[in-house]
Amino acid sequence: MNMMEIEKNRILKKYEEELEKTTYFLTKELPDLNISSIVVYGSATYPNMFVEGVSDIDIIAYAKNMKKFSSKKIIDYLKKKKLDFKDKEPVVYVDHIGYRIEFYIQFETIAIDVTLLPYEIPNFEKRRIDAAYDSLEMLMGALYVHGIVLFGSRPLENYIQSNFLPFYSDELRYIRLDIITKRLNLYLKRLEIYTNCKNPNLVDHLYKSRNLFLKWLFIYKKKYPVNLSKHIDYQLQSLQLEIIEIKTLEFLNGDLLKISQEFLKLTNKYLQQYAVERKNENR
């Protein structure tokens, strides 16, 4: 394991033994999967975000041979290991994040939330067309900017370091912003209608719209987010927003209708700024 990184992080240092056992299990007891990298991400890697007794430790384990086996075979094999899965036995997901298998390993002191991924960046080849739905920026933020490598090296490590950090090119930025802007405008139009008529579906669509706008805003500001629904205050501090803007995005100003109205004003402000930027860029 990467002892230097563990020593620098008080959470990982405290649970070093559990991390060692997890690393051993993944690399030695799952040899056919060929685990090539293990990365800690999530609250344990962000200052003051880990809550003792509530938070778990999130781990990505990249498996070079994962696609050689059916998900059922992998899950059956994991279950035969008789681990304490707490309330999360191995389960397969195939969605906008990508193909993966998730499960807990429960120790007496802490739960380790493990995600098995193929040794690749999910949907990386679609980054120019799938911007409204993929998780590219969050993967960059959570795994490459803040992630702590315990074992091996992350997929495309050198390429990401050279081309995506501190942020990717303006060319890709404009491509992704333009795609997301179209989808965001549809969300905001519906949100405005729901707000004006006090539609009971307002709450769901307000949060849905915020998630997409936060994704847009981080790209606009050339910063990588780590999560679009958690650790909001911590993440917004990096965007150099006004205090009132942060409060607006945290949904802390007044009743639901006022929150939605203020959110719509804020999104309109930044979309107008981007329209000016694009106009100047195309001159």
Image (cartoon, rainbow, N blue to C red):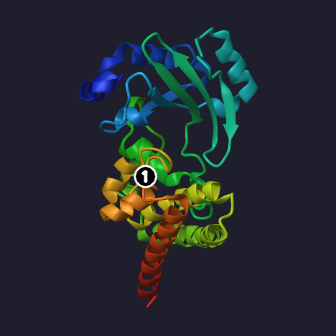
Which residue is painted at 50% across and 50% down in the image? 228
Q: Residue at x 36, y 46 (%)?
A: 145
Q: How many marks?
A: 1
Looking at the picture, tell me which residue is in the foreground, 59 or 237. 237
Residue 157 seen from this side: no
In the rendering, at what x and y percent does residue 140 appear? Answer: 44, 49
Residue 88, x across and y down, in percent: 62, 23
Which image quadrant: the N terminus?
Answer: top left
Residue at 65 percent across and 23 percent down: it is 90
Does residue 28 show up?
A: yes
Residue toward you, 171 or 233: 233
Quarter that holds the C terminus: bottom left
Which residue was labeled with disc 1? 225
Query: Is the residue 274 above or below the residue 150 in the image?
Result: below
Q: Where is 39 relative to 143, above or below?
A: above
In this rendering, would 104 be left or right of 221?
A: right
* Label 1: few (<14), some (14–19) or many (≥20) C-alpha neighbours in 10 Å: many
Q: Residue at x 67, y 14 (%)?
A: 79
Q: Residue furthest bottom?
A: 283
Measuring from the top left, give residue 33's x and y in whole percent.
60, 24
Q: Quadrant of residue 220?
A: bottom left
Give left or right: position of 263 versus 247. Answer: right
Rendered position, 250 above or below 52 = below
Q: Nearer the viewer, residue 63 or 223?
A: 223
Which quadrant of the structure image shows residue 92?
top right
Q: Considering the numbered disc 1 on the image, is that residue within a helix, a strand or a loop?
A: loop
Q: Position of residue 207 (x, y in %)?
A: 57, 55
Front position in the image: 8 or 14: 14
Disc 1 marks a residue whose amino acid type is Pro
Q: Quadrant of residue 73?
A: top right
